[in-house]
Image (spheres, rainbow, N blue to C red):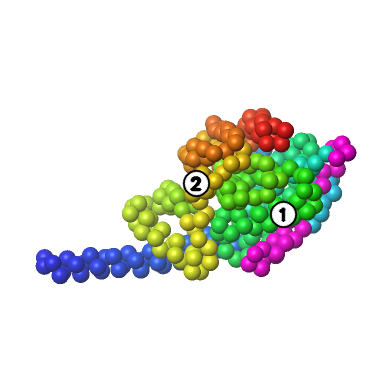
Amino acid sequence: MKKKDIFALIGGTLGGMSLVCASSAGYIIKEKFVRHAPAIPKPGSIESVDEMHMDYLRRKGISRIKAQNIEQLELISYDGLRLKGEYIHNTEIARAPGESRKVVILSHGYGGTGYRDLMIFADFYLKQGFDILIIDQRSHGRSEGTFISFGDRESEDLGMWVSRVIEIAGTDCKILLHGWSMGAAIVYLAAAKGLPPQVKGVVYDCGFDSAEAQMFYVAGTSTALPKVVLWWLMQFLKPMTRIIGRFDLREASPIKYAGNMHLPVFFVHGKEDSLVPAKMGKRLYRATYRSAYKKILIVPGADHTYSYVRDKAGYEAGIKDLIKHCMG
């Protein structure tokens, strides 16, 4: 075969791959980066013991929340979206005169809502004397938005929510950030980029260390495509998210900002996490070397977001220890 024929073959192959990757990247953006209606479980679809336990804790938390004083909130994001939240004034524990308020901001995951995800922790935080801010991330729940940026834009929104909490709870308040999955990446990014001193600590539950690495992992476990093809696909996906969604997927990377994280962090990850591998949580834990305090809990037998269900006592002990270190 002549050289020009070899070059033509290589060029044609690369051109064909590029066309396929560009089309695939467009499909991925449409399916994974754009708001979709949340899936509603069908009656009888909750089958595992873990799912039943999770559903019980969620219902219990929502019931406790509804018995408190609920304040409806709305803010306008830096790019003009109406974001919705609810501030839960804890009416169960009396504060001493001059005692500062403790507030936890709950940050839900991809495809979730404030009420669907982290309500399993509501009962615990109310008993600890916390007010609670429940938010719907942009492009989720009642909040406006089309594109999901996996933490790039959402971390900016979280900074605005922190400011709103300070307006409500006072400049002497103490704020804890608690997120899971994508919501964990959001709170970590926001804290590492810099938040007011009222923010004292972070609970990081089963979050990814990099959105790009997470997508590469999921694609690798759910398809038979060679890694070289997946890598090539990512090279098209990144610029297309900037052009179409106007966000930078490379910035949705907690580990990129790990060197800036100084706040105390409690890391939690299920050992059997099938969506975000536990090695990501461990990697970010090691990279968070400047934190004033850090601890990691790896829960045996726990799949994605099920660590609290599997080890409620260990999880709560970890949060209490974090609170002790960052709030006194």
Residue at the spot x=70%, y=52% of the render? 162
Tell me the quarter of the picture where residue 60 sits. Answer: top right
* Image coords of residue 102 (percent x, y): 76, 41
Residue 185 drawn above or below residue 279: below
Residue at the spot x=63%, y=29% of the render? 314
* Image coords of residue 80 (percent x, y): 66, 68
Tell me the quarter of the picture where residue 238 sits. Answer: bottom left
Tell me the quarter of the picture where residue 22 sits. Answer: bottom left
The residue labelled by disc 2 is 255
Residue at the spot x=64%, y=32% of the render? 318
- Viewer can see residue 271: yes
Residue 318 drawn above or below residue 76: above
* Image coords of residue 32 (percent x, y): 52, 59
Give me the disc on residue 87. none
Residue at the spot x=75%, y=61% of the render? 74
Secondary structure found at label 1: helix
Which residue ends up furthest to the left in the rendered image?
2
Mark 1 is surrounded, within 10 Å at the Cα level, by few (under 14), some (14 to 19) or many (20 or more) other residues, namely some
Q: Earlier in the sequence, mark 2 or mark 1?
A: 1
On-image quarter of the C terminus: top right
Q: How many marks?
A: 2
- Viewer can see residue 182: no
Using the image as rendered, state which of residue 280 and residue 295 is in the foreground.
Answer: 295
The residue labelled by disc 1 is 163
Residue 275 drawn above or below residue 322: below
Secondary structure found at label 2: helix
* Image coords of residue 106 (percent x, y): 68, 47
Question: Start and end of the magenta stretch?
Answer: 73-98
Asked whether 78 falls inside the magenta stretch, the response is yes
Mark 2 is surrounded, within 10 Å at the Cα level, by few (under 14), some (14 to 19) or many (20 or more) other residues, namely many
Q: Is residue 325 left or right of residue 215?
A: right
**Gap between marks 2 and 1, in whole Å?**
25 Å
